[in-house]
Image (cartoon, rainbow, N blue to C red):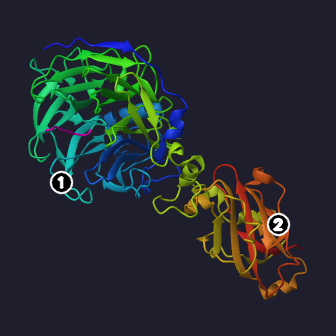
Amino acid sequence: MSMRTRFEIVGREPDPARKFACRRMIVGPWLSQPEQFPGYNGFVGWSGVTVLKSGRWLVTFNAGYWHASMPVTEAILEDPACRAQFDRHLRMGCPDLESPRGGRTFLMHSDDGGLTWSTPRVIIDTEHTDCHAMIAEMDNGALLCSWYVEDLPDVCVATHMRSHDGGETWGEHRTFSAGARAAGNESALVLSDGTVLHALYGYYRGEEGRSWEAVGIHRSRDHGETWERIAVVGNDDHHMHEQSLAELPDGRIVLISRAHGDIAWSEDGGETWTEPESIGISIYDPHLIVTPDGVLAAFAGSYFGGGLRVTLSPDGGRTWHGPGDHYGYDVDASAYGYNHPILLDDGSVYVIYQSTGGHHTHHARTMALWGVRVKVSPAADGIEMLPARGSPADIGYEAAYDMVVNQDGPASHRAPTRRSAHDDPRLEGDEVFDRHWTRHAVIAPLPRDGWKFRKDRARVGEEKGWARPGIDLDGWHDIRIGDWWDAFGFHHLGTAWYRLEWTVPEEAERYPQRLLAFGAVDGECAVYVDGAFAGAPDHGFDGWETPFEIDVTSQLAPGSSVVIAVKVRNSTGPAGIWRSVKLIAPP
């Protein structure tokens, strides 16, 4: 059977600004950071999303140091082939670091439709990098997780495991058939009769003894327990990888792949296929979704249009629609195209995708995963952007911003940020006092522990007397000084307060003048003693690492118990009392 395909320009792009209001960050520099491990450099990507029959949402993602976070050690690089491949990665922008076990896979869940998420936990950590883990629920409730393990030089093996308790625990790791390398960002497909198909690309041996990059169709009739390869799709003219399967309303199976939109159909459950043919679009990481209206949607990265786009077919893949010459409708053209979509009960499509490819170190360190909803037109002539839970369009810009940055306390569902003053040894220590106050006497250091912290998003702290003694400390949180507040999980832009109840040492009486010396405060700040303004440095934001002192002779009487409060306001990045504070006396 032959199916001649064509591409038609139909409809127009959605509002290009709408996506920024509708998308929601799920993992990012300040949000849901994975637990630190050797070789982690900020890269998060290759994500997948699944909605279980119970209503629980699952998100998987890979964390590592780069676009391809394979294990790297001095011993591994002694192999010339490993060294040569790693050198190619360095030329592409890979950081030169050691990663003994490479990247690993994390799992998060949400029980409220993606509004809040659990702390990421490791589900796969082998001695290889573990990448592109996708989960599908079988019709008996078992979960099938498939991914690939990767090593230098050019080792890639498709692997799978199963869970019978909703993903809490997982069984043994198993491989598929010989030659099967990876599924890309694609999960297995459960057909209407319960049969499971999985398309895995690899190098499969052809009839003439040659191997080409093609797609192997694997089938399981026992809920993912065992697998057999039943077909290979592709030939010397159509090298196929990063593929996706979908079951059409008439029972046919359709397959699409990178890089030219090569497409094929099967009428017998995947055992035989039409010869692949290109639909004329240049794409990567395509994923097929069949909407309740019967529209076939291919979400993919676009070489022509750029970013993440979706191309629509009203007739099962024979005719394809987009707003321009051979590219799809804009889902998020500002992002990298790797994605994973799922169909929700309301007929909309939820898509998870990554911000960049992490090809350069500065990209990897600021990687983020986003989620957005899309409504596909029943006429296959366009899309409507819908708000993801927790996005600005869903709960308002200020509330959405608060969820990521301005929470009242350290977020229980997020690990603290990696950003710390102690990450850079040049910023540590008390040598700043030795340099700046060489002739001063140190009366006493203020403790690093015992401070309280509260965000002041509405800037009401001064009016409500947050610097005064005896106030209700409900809503305040414990914090240490000597590091930015971000290091303790307080991700915040704006005004915040520190306060410390402290007893002035009796020996302070020996000194006629007493100064509070701050090693540095990042942000504009003001100092109060027992609710009264004591002073403020005049260096503003630019003095983030500048020492300063405040004369508190009249306010810190020897032997008295006082409340020392510091109001800090930042406009970008880390902030807070990130160096120590001491009571000193001039000569």
Earlier in the chain: of badge 1 and badge 2, it is: 1
Can residue 375 be seen? yes
- Tag 2: amino acid: Glu
**Along the horizontal axis of the image, is 503 left or right of 394?**
right
State the mark number for residue 321: none
The residue closer to the viewer here, 433 or 285, is 285
Residue range corresponding to the magenta coloring = 187-192
Does 191 appear in magenta? yes
Q: Residues within 10 Å of mark 2 (few under 14, many from 20)?
A: many
Give the residue number, with chain letter if any, for mark 2: 549
Q: Residues within 10 Å of mark 1 (few under 14, many from 20)?
A: few
Is residue 83 visible from the viewing direction of this image? Answer: no
Q: Is residue 73 left or right of residue 238?
A: right
User: Are the two marked residues, 1 and 2, in contact with CB atoms closer than 8 angstroms?
Assistant: no
Q: Is 382 displayed left or right of 503 in the figure?
A: left
Give the residue at x 35% y 52%: 106
Percent position of residue 100, x then y: 36, 50
